[in-house]
């Protein structure tokens, strides 16, 4: 069989000419889109830095260590919101991770095919609920129930003078650090569950079947084969959840209790960086107040950026790492 | 920075649209936004002029009028006469509102609990911690007060409401003035913060033993338990249109530059935490026609808007104050040649 040489056909020549004209333009367009992204990112960092500089240079290290936030005297220390951000993000991760893991394992290993789609859709729907809805639900529905059935009994049960009493102190009205963490956990759950499920599905069927063939129980397969196989990427998935928890604003603002002080217990009111900015930016009239809020924004940007960078690095690494 | 940029951009876009259509744009305080919207709606139907009001907060309103992106700014916190002079602005009040301390106390009916300003400040300072504290019991002889801890609820967002409330506490308690002071947002010594009036209302409703403060319209609309608060002369008053109007009538509007008179803590039957909300316009109007239509709108509202204001739980200005404001317009708001842009008929 002989194949007609392509050069005898006039059409490819014309195509080549067209390619010579449009390809460079296309390349430039794509490159400028990518450059614009980098410029935007750089612009955000620079303007946050410039905007926050007056506060950062005035207070120096005490901006991170002091929790005095007094707009009347123009003294700003961000320790309260920074601590609140980290505490709620880590707590929410502690609640969401086991659940997300359970959902992902169930969907991949145990789920009857008939249920797989409905559960998958439910997880996606949960991810699609706007955060303000979580906030209002949290304040009007969740908080009263949480106060009555969790906070009040726990406070009543705590032996006076014990460490336990220290931990559960606060105002038992359903809003506070712990409530905010639980709402956050619900919000980051679907992202983590979906990412973990995708990861588990990347494991070649053969590997798992071999393990079962060797006589492993399901638990053993998950513990000794599945998890080691996706370990690094799974950490990346966790980091993505953490990144979202760090920056979540409206839902947290509704339910965290909004006090600038360093939280004393898990039922105590606190604040996060994002909630502080959302609360105060509109009415921040003094320049230093605005600057302090922008500086907090820079801190949050740094936190989220490093978490996402770690996530990227781990997700990008070889799957069998 | 980005937010204010975005606001500026939106306001500029809207302003340019407005300029084309002969419409007017204002921005500022959230507290009077419902009544401004209502007035704008009726005014559009009667006069054909569209008034766009953006409730971006008092701080935002002051920034926007100073940046000249809007035809008028609105603020709950009056500018001082020095600020007004420096910026070349004229300030006038539109409606009066009251701020109401609200409680959630099982077994105590609305208006039954009596407090005075000093004790209220002590509670917000965290010095009085229980409802059966002797300081509260002394004001409520013969009443069975619960042994509940007091949960203070304040606004978490910067707000004109907080400004008026903390101004009142500063006025009646020296300790509060020295330690906390008055501002749209302060370093609250005690309690939790709710976002917006409705956030405070929700937290108070959900927390037995809570004490918060909201605009009258929210205490009224949410059926929250208000307290009886003593005026400067010691009379215990309930918050309502009548006691707010008394506060407005007693104040010395004529001799206060920029109408920035304090309605707080007056003697007699005047609700002690009342305040006016203000509009800011430029003395010298670059666009005389636009300046005239702003004043025309508010003059129309003074003449026709009282019923609507009352319906929305605001208190209209006393007639004498309206006359004073009209005089100020004729005297102070002028075009480039110094001619008044609008004279009320």
Image: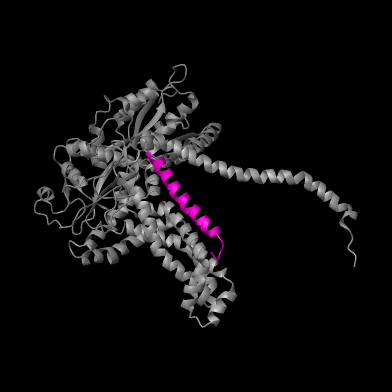
Render colour scheme = one colour
Q: Position of residue A308 (x, y in %)?
A: 49, 53
Q: Is residue A289 visible?
A: yes
Residue at the location (37% across, 50% down)?
Answer: A272
Q: Nearer the viewer, residue B56 or A135?
A: A135
Question: As rendered, which of B242 and A103 lies closer to the eye?
Answer: A103
Asked if residue A318 lies in the magenta stretch, the reply is: yes
Q: Quadrant of residue B315?
A: top left
Please determine whether, in this image, residue A181 is positioned above or below residue B24.
Answer: below
In the picture, residue B281 is in which quadrant?
top left
The reply, left or right, for residue A91 in relation to residue B152 is: right
Which percent across, then down, holds residue A311?
Answer: 50, 56
At which x and y percent is residue A276? 37, 46
Q: Residue at 16% across / 53% down in the picture?
A: B131
Q: Is residue A107 left or right of residue A84?
A: right
How many numbered circles does the render carry?
A: 0
User: Residue A58: x percent and y percent?
Assistant: 35, 34
Quadrant showing the N terminus of chain A? bottom right
> Looking at the image, is B159 positioned above or below residue A121?
above
Above-or-below relation of A108 to A66: below
Q: Is A52 in the magenta? A: no
Tell me the magenta residue range: A292-321
Secondary structure, magenta segment, majority class: helix
Q: Is residue B1 visible?
A: no
Q: In this rendered view, identify the residue nearer to me: B102 or B209.
A: B209
Q: Is residue B134 above or below residue A104?
A: above
Q: Is residue B24 left or right of residue B199?
A: right
């Amino acid at each position: 069989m002989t194949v007609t040489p392509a050069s005898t056909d006039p059409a490819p020549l014309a195509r080549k000419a067209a390619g010579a004209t449009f390809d460079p333009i296309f390349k430039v367009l794509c490159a400028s889109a990518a450059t614009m992204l980098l410029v935007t990112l750089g612009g955000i960092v620079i303007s946050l830095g410039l905007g926050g500089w007056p506060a950062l240079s005035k207070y120096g290290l005490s901006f991170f260590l002091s929790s005095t936030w007094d707009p009347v005297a123009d003294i700003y220390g961000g320790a309260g919101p920074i601590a609140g951000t980290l505490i709620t993000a880590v707590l929410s991760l502690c609640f969401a991770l086991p659940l997300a893991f359970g959902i992902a394992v169930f969907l991949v290993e145990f789920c009857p095919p008939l249920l797989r789609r409905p559960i998958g859709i439910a997880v996606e729907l949960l991810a699609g609920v706007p955060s303000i809805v979580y906030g209002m639900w949290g304040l009007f529905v969740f908080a009263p129930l949480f106060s009555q059935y969790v906070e009040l009994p726990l406070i009543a049960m705590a032996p006076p003078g014990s460490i336990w009493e220290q931990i559960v102190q606060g105002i038992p009205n359903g809003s506070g650090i712990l409530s905010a963490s639980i709402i956050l956990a619900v919000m980051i759950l679907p992202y983590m569950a979906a990412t973990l499920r995708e990861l588990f599905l990347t494991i070649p069927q053969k590997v798992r079947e071999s393990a079962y063939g060797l006589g492993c129980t399901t638990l053993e397969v998950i513990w000794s084969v599945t998890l080691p196989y996706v370990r690094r990427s799974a950490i990346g998935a966790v980091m993505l959840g953490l990144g979202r928890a760090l920056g979540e604003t409206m839902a947290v603002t509704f339910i965290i209790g909004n006090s600038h002080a360093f939280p004393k217990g898990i039922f105590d009111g606190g604040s996060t960086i994002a909630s502080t900015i959302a609360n105060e930016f509109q009415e921040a009239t003094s320049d230093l107040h605005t600057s302090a809020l922008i500086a907090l924004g820079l801190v949050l940007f740094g936190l989220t950026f490093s978490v996402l960078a770690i996530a990227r690095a781990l997700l990008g690494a070889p799957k069998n790492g | 920075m980005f937010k204010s940029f975005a606001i500026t951009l939106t306001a500029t876009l809207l302003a340019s649209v407005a300029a084309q259509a002969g419409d007017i744009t204002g921005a500022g305080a959230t507290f009077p936004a419902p009544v401004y919207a209502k007035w704008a709606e009726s005014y559009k139907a009667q006069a054909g002029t569209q008034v766009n009001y953006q409730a971006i907060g008092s701080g935002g309103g002051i920034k926007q009028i100073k940046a000249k992106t809007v035809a008028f700014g609105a603020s709950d916190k009056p500018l001082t006469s020095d600020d007004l002079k420096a910026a070349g602005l004229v300030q006038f009040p539109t409606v009066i509102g009251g701020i109401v301390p609200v409680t959630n106390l099982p077994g105590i009916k609305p208006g039954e609990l009596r407090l005075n300003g000093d004790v209220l400040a002590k509670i917000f300072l965290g010095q009085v911690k229980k409802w059966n504290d002797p300081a509260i019991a002394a004001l409520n002889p013969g009443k069975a007060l619960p042994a509940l801890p007091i949960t203070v609820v304040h606004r978490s967002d910067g707000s004109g409401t907080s400004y008026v409330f903390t101004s009142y506490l500063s006025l009646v308690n020296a300790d509060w003035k020295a330690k906390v002071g008055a501002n749209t947002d302060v370093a609250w010594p005690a309690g939790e913060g709710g976002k917006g009036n409705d956030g405070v209302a929700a937290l108070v409703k959900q927390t037995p033993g809570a004490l918060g403060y909201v605009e009258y319209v929210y205490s009224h609309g949410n059926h929250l338990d208000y307290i009886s608060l003593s005026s400067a002369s010691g009379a215990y008053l309930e918050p309502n249109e009548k006691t707010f109007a008394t506060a407005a009538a007693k104040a010395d509007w004529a001799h206060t530059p920029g109408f920035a008179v304090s309605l707080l803590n007056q003697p007699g039957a005047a609700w002690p935490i009342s305040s006016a909300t203000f509009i800011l316009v430029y003395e010298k109007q670059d666009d005389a026609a636009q300046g005239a239509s702003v004043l025309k709108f508010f003059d129309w509202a003074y003449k026709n808007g009282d019923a609507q204001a009352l319906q929305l739980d605001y208190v209209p200005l006393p007639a004498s104050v309206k006359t004073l404001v009209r005089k100020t317009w004729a005297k102070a708001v002028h075009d480039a040649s110094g001619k008044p842009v609008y004279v009320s008929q």
